[in-house]
């Protein structure tokens, strides 16, 4: 992601004043969070972009807290609140905005003041065990994984040899602990210089800090998109959130949600995905990097996604809520190839 932003900044250097970083406010530790509803486009304009998903609400999140923003992972915790983790190593706990009784938001640090993590502040992925008393975080700059307790206190750290050559800006971008105890980790970068579909992937047998060497496989996504997060459905399948830079000036993004079946993972094999939702204009889109699933009504689940605003004046921290019946999602094994639309200058 940082590489994409660097490209946008290069263009800005040639045309100053058109894409600006937000004015830095005075340092604040205010424990407050605001949700501003975003108007949704007409159903007719959405068309088939969301497939079986129904977009229920979108909120623009803001806060005076200096640690707010840049969220790259989203977890639904056992107490019903969300845990969002930023690419600067900070976290935010908050209640869903449509919850009747709102617990006060809490801001904190994952431990990036620890000397071990001084150069490892780019946390890009996170997952937890079913009880929610253990949390794992993936660090892109060092291709490391840390383990934390429920209060985000650091318990341990590992740099898996299988992730050693994942790159400094294209490391463990998506991570999920499955119901069967396996942990999946996806590399953001493509598996080759001229590759734009395949990503290196690992399946650990349990905790990466204590498990034997992981199984290596390849994750195949839609052309031109990179994985940013993933979450498991009640039926065992996994939704993978993906993103690409659509146009760097002004900076705009395009997103996809794809579905995969972990039962299809084979050592050295290719795990194929199927696109189930296209997150694109006229929908209110931004740099979506976090996804979480919560129980819904009548056999449905709620799918939540959050965006990384990159602390840029032209971007927002958006939170989406969608509802979907997993039984209406297509079979992940029936491959549906998709060629992304051409970037638009508009």
Image (cartoon, rainbow, N blue to C red):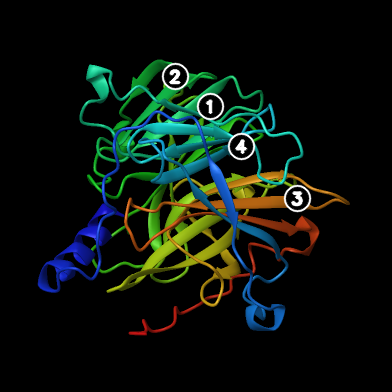
Among numbered discs 4 and 1, the one appearing first in the sequence: 4
Among numbered discs 4 and 3, the one appearing first in the sequence: 4
**Up-down relation of residue 51 to residue 65 (above or below):** below
The residue at 65%/29% (across/down) is 103
Q: Position of residue 31 (x, y in %)?
A: 49, 30
Among numbered discs 3 and 1, the one appearing first in the sequence: 1
Q: Secondary structure at mark 3?
A: strand
Q: Nearer the viewer, mark 2 or mark 3?
A: 3
Q: Which mark is residue 210?
A: 2
Disc 2 from disc 3: Cα separation: 32 Å
Q: Is the C-beta separation of discs 2 and 4 under 8 Å?
A: no
Q: Secondary structure at mark 2?
A: loop
Tag 4 residue:
178
Tag 1 residue:
206
Tag 3 residue:
301
Horizontally, is 43 left or right of 15 in the view? right
Q: Position of residue 205 (x, y in %)?
A: 52, 29
Among numbered discs 2 and 4, the one appearing first in the sequence: 4
Crowd band around label 4 with a 10 angstrom C-alpha radius: few (<14), some (14–19), many (20+): many
Q: Secondary structure at mark 4?
A: loop
Residue at the far left in the pictured view:
14
Horizontally, is 13 left or right of 90 in the view? left
- Residues 72 and 94: in front is 94
Residue at the far front in the pictured view:
26
């Amino acid at each position: 992601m940082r590489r994409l932003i660097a490209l946008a900044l290069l263009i800005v250097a040639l045309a100053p004043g058109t894409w600006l970083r937000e004015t830095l406010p005075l340092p604040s530790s205010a424990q407050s969070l605001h949700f501003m509803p975003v108007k949704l486009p007409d159903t007719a304009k959405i068309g088939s972009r969301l497939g079986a998903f129904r977009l229920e609400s979108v909120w623009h999140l803001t806060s005076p807290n200096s640690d707010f923003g840049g969220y790259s992972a989203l977890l639904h915790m056992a107490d019903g609140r969300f845990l969002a983790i930023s690419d600067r190593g900070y976290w935010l706990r908050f209640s869903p905005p449509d919850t009747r009784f709102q617990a006060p938001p809490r801001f904190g640090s994952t431990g990036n003041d620890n000397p071990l993590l001084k150069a490892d502040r780019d946390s890009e992925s996170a997952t937890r065990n079913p009880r929610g008393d253990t949390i794992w975080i993936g660090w892109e700059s060092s291709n490391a994984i840390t383990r934390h307790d429920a209060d985000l206190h650091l318990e341990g750290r590992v740099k898996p040899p299988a992730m050693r050559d994942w790159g400094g800006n294209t490391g463990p971008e998506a991570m999920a602990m499955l119901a069967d105890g396996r942990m999946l980790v996806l590399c953001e970068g493509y598996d080759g210089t001229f590759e734009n579909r395949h990503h290196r992937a690992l399946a650990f047998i349990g905790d990466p800090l204590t498990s034997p060497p992981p199984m290596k496989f390849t994750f195949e996504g839609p052309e031109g998109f990179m994985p940013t997060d993933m979450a498991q459905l009640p039926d065992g399948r996994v939704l993978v959130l993906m993103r690409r830079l659509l146009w760097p000036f002004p900076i705009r993004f395009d997103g996809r949600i794809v579905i995969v079946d972990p039962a299809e993972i084979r050592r050295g094999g290719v795990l194929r995905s199927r696109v189930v939702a296209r997150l694109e204009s006229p929908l209110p889109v931004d740099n979506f990097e976090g996804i979480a699933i919560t129980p819904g009504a009548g056999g449905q689940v709620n799918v939540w996604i959050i965006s990384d605003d990159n602390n840029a004046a032209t971007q927002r921290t958006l939170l989406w809520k969608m509802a979907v019946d997993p039984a209406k999602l297509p079979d992940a094994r029936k491959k549906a190839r998709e060629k992304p639309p051409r970037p638009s200058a508009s």
